Amino acid sequence: MAAIQGVQNFAGQSSIRTWLVGILKHKIIDHLRRQSREAPLQTDADEFSLEDLDGLFKSDGHYAEEPANWSSPDAALNEKRFFEALERCMQGLPDKSAKAFMMREVLGMETGEICKELRISSTNCWVLLYRARTALRLCLEKSWFGAPARP
Amino acid sequence: MGLFSLTCKQASRLQSQALDRELRLSERLALGFHLGLCDACRKISMQMDFLRRAARAYRVSDDDSGN
């Protein structure tokens, strides 16, 4: 339904790309819905609180563990296996964070649109995106970029 | 938020938000100052920017595969 409305909204400036993005958006959201039926859902409160990420930082706000160097990460973009790893990491995200990240970064939607779609405030939207980026960073660090080099 | 008092934890939130909204001048200054001094946070910036490129490339790879 969202895709149909989207196409109507864009009727004046309609393009194949808009239409494709609408379809893809649907596909992603369907995928996430399916997956959320299979995986236990975190409640909204869990996703909007960042307490579980506190462990990344020391009490003075510095990183508890130095972030790893990702040497020439863009080389990964030529590897099919990298996208499989990225997909697995995205599937590991909590439901709303996954949707927010997909809409923002995969589909390139504006934050305002995403808030509307998820019926949340901008502040909570930024929290979800921050959570998603942090979790994906850590997941790829483990599954793709290997153990961090220690100085 | 003072110009010189940003922690890595606060910086990381702003680094993410910089990808989603226009930061206020005070936030940009504080973040810029912090990044100038902090190796760890510069790496985080690079990683977050990379995630954006990877996600865009993921869409293209998804379109190509036709499934």
Image (cartoon, rainbow, N blue to C red):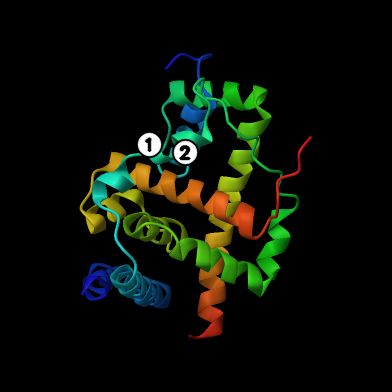
Query: Where in the figure is residue A51, as x and y percent of width and height?
Result: 37, 36
Asked if the residue at tag 1 contacts the one at tag 2, i.e. Cβ–Cβ closer than 8 Å, the answer is no
In three-dimensional space, the C-alpha distance between marks 2 and 1, rounded to whole angstroms, equals 21 Å
| Residue type marked 1 | Glu
A39 vs A120, left or right, is right
Q: Quadrant of residue A100?
A: bottom left
Callout 1: helix, strand or loop?
A: helix
Q: Quadrant of the N terminus of chain A?
A: bottom left
Residue situated furthest right in the rendering: A151
Q: Residue at x 52, y 53 (%)?
A: A136
Query: Which mark, residue A51?
Result: 1
Q: B21 or A129, which is in the foreground?
A: A129
Q: How many marks?
A: 2
Q: Residues within 10 Å of mark 1 (few under 14, many from 20)?
A: few
B67 vs A75, left or right, is left
Q: Quadrant of the C terminus of chain A?
A: top right
Query: Where in the figure is residue B13, as x and y percent of width and height?
Result: 45, 35
Q: Chain of mark 1?
A: A
Asked if residue B27 is positioned above or below residue A108 in the image, the reply reads above
Residue situated furthest bottom in the rendering: B66
Q: Which residue is mark 2?
A: B18
Query: Which mark, residue B5?
Result: none
Q: Residue at x 75, y 50 (%)?
A: A71
Query: Where in the figure is residue B33, as x and y percent of width and height?
Result: 59, 21
| Residue type marked 2 | Ala
Q: Residue at x 35, y 69 (%)?
A: A32
Q: Quadrant of residue A50?
A: top left
